[in-house]
Image (cartoon, rainbow, N blue to C red):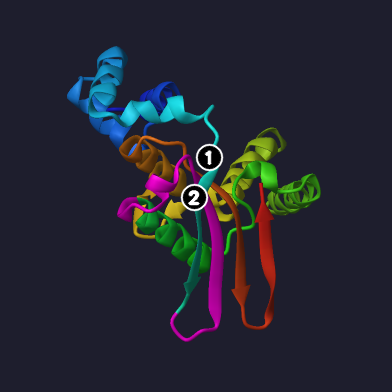
Amino acid sequence: MTIDAKQVKELREKTGAGMMDCKRALMDSEGDIKKAIENLRKSGIAKAEKKGTRFAKDGLVFSYIHPGGRLGVLVEIGCETDFVAKTDDFIKLTKDIAMQIAATNPISINRDGISDDVISQEKDIYLAQAENSRKPAHILEKIVTGRLDKFYQENCLMEQPFIKDPNRKVNDLITQAVAKLGEKIEVNRFTRFEIGEAGTNNNN
């Protein structure tokens, strides 16, 4: 059967599970949201949303240097215990996220980290582009909103497609790690260094 994006979004909001996990659960339950939630809970994936109120007081600062030594990343990823911080799964996650930052050069961890001035400037640019292309006035706002969403997807780390699997976003990667490791996990900050450019610091 066909599962639409609205159903997937609803299930994600209710469970905190990744997009592909939600889609599979809906297909297995023939579109029944309640059964899909139950299936996700049984598999442990839906537990991720319950970790949101916990405090990630432990974790790792991970360094990644790209071959050639001209590009490097420092990223701090938090979890709840030193035990989880030392697991192979957590270390792999931190490395994957460091490589993601190196490859995509995000502006911020999430939308909240982008200043209002930057957003206002982007909106002005998109509006001018839409007006110059002689688009009808009644769809200008829709065009600007769509282009702004794309801007967020390209520049907010958590919304970027994962470089090793574009069908998943970085946020999905973290959600799945939370479900597997049983602790709250969050990206706290990162700095990206590249020869000839100023370092980019992100603290959210």
Is residue 38 depicted above or below 59 in this figure? above
Look at the image and give the residue range highlighted in magenta.
67-89
The Cα–Cα distance between marks 2 and 1, rounded to whole angstroms, is 7 Å
User: Disc 1 marks which residue?
Assistant: 56
Asked whether 70 or 21 is in front, the reply is 70
**Nearer to the camera, 199 or 94:** 94
Quadrant assignment for the N terminus: top left
Q: Amino acid at mark 1?
A: Ala
Which residue is located at x 36 percent, y 36 percent? 19
Q: Residue furthest bottom?
A: 68
Foreground of the two, 52 or 197: 52
* Labels 2 and 1 touching (C-beta < 8 A): yes
Residue 9: percent from left, percent from top: 42, 28
> What is the x, y in percent for residue 62?
49, 63
Quadrant of the rendered image containing residue 70:
bottom right
In which quarter of the view is residue 182 placed? top left
Instruction: Indicate the position of residue 27 as horizontal and vertical percent values.
Output: 21, 27
User: Secondary structure beneath disc 1?
Assistant: loop
Left-right relation of 119 to 25: right
Mark 2, residue position: 59
Residue 35 is one of the magenta-drawn residues: no
